[in-house]
Image (spheres, grey):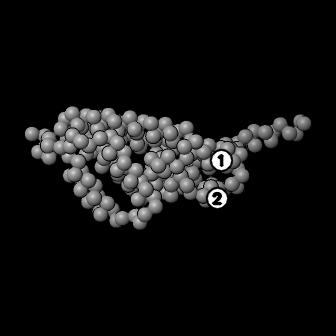
Amino acid sequence: MAGAAPSEPRLRADARRNSEQIRSAAIGAFQGQGLTVPLEKVAQAAGVSKATIFNRFGGRIGLIDAVIEEVVARELFAVIEHTRSVGAVERIAYYLTAIRDLQYRQPAFNDVLLQTYPHSRQLMEICRVGSEANEEFIAAARASGALRPEFTAGDLHALVLDNALALKHGTRPPRDDYDRRTMYLLDGIRGRSAASGGR
């Protein structure tokens, strides 16, 4: 027993190092390929076995919950907070443009929007916050005349989900084409005050 004690700190240090390596690998893999990336790829990038991921995080859901803040939530919440500082007329245009940009750059964000892993508490909390933000910004935009009066939060939700499905399962368009279509979308939903520059 006397010889076993010194190995315990080393084991704990190895476990911590493995966990951090897995977290770092998962963040990179999820950001680059989405939340559905095979765990074997995460394990390979972390230099551990797939079994180690299960030992440390309990599987994919536990791993998602452990890193989703760094992968998606932090940036999305920053978009929401900045949107609140934008003038009422341009607020919805900024928000929708920023959300579509995040969808294009972060495949994991589309997995969140599509609720690919509904058993992830963190993922579902992000969806709740995003849904409340949609309601808030649509209500403010309609009140200011920045949106067509018939355009609803449900319409925005459907458009964002349609885009998520297209990016996840379709052919990824060139960025210039994607941004041009964002402008077409904005032109289609703008109200009178937005079209006239707020006058």
Q: Is residue 133 left or right of residue 49?
A: left
Residue type indicated by callout 1 = Gly
Which residue is situated farthest in the left direction here? 199
- Eyeballing the image, is 118 above or below 187? above
In the drawing, does residue 20 fall left or right of residue 125? Answer: right
Q: Earlier in the sequence, mark 1 or mark 2?
A: 2
Q: Residue at x 41, y 43 (%)?
A: 75
In percent of width and height, residue 186 lies at: 24, 50
Q: Nearer the viewer, residue 127 or 175?
A: 127
> For residue 59, which numbered disc appears in the image?
1
Quadrant containing the N terminus in the rendered view: top right
Q: Residue furthest front?
A: 150
Image quarter where the C terminus lies is top left
Residue 4: give x, y in percent of width and height: 86, 39
Query: Residue 134, how many percent across, how many down?
Result: 34, 39
Question: Is residue 174 shown to the viewer in this render?
Answer: yes
Q: Using the image as rendered, state which of residue 28 and residue 54 is in the foreground.
A: 54
Q: Which mark is residue 40?
A: 2
Q: Which mark is residue 47?
A: none
Could you say which quadrant of the image residue 43 lies in? bottom right
**Image check: 94 left or right of 80?**
left
Q: Secondary structure at mark 2?
A: helix
**What's under tag 2, amino acid-wise?**
Glu
For label 1, the SS is: loop
Find the distance from the CA under tag 1 to the CA under tag 2.
Answer: 11 Å
Whether pointer 1 and pointer 2 mark residues with C-beta atoms closer than 8 Å, the reply is: no
Q: Is 2 or 143 nearer to us in this picture? A: 143
**What residue do we see at 28% from left, 38% from top?**
138
Circle 2 Cα neighbour tier, 10 Å, few/some/many (<14 / 14–19 / ≥20): some
Q: Residue at x 70, y 55 (%)?
A: 49
Query: Vertically, is 167 above or below 2?
Result: below
Residue 105 seen from this side: no
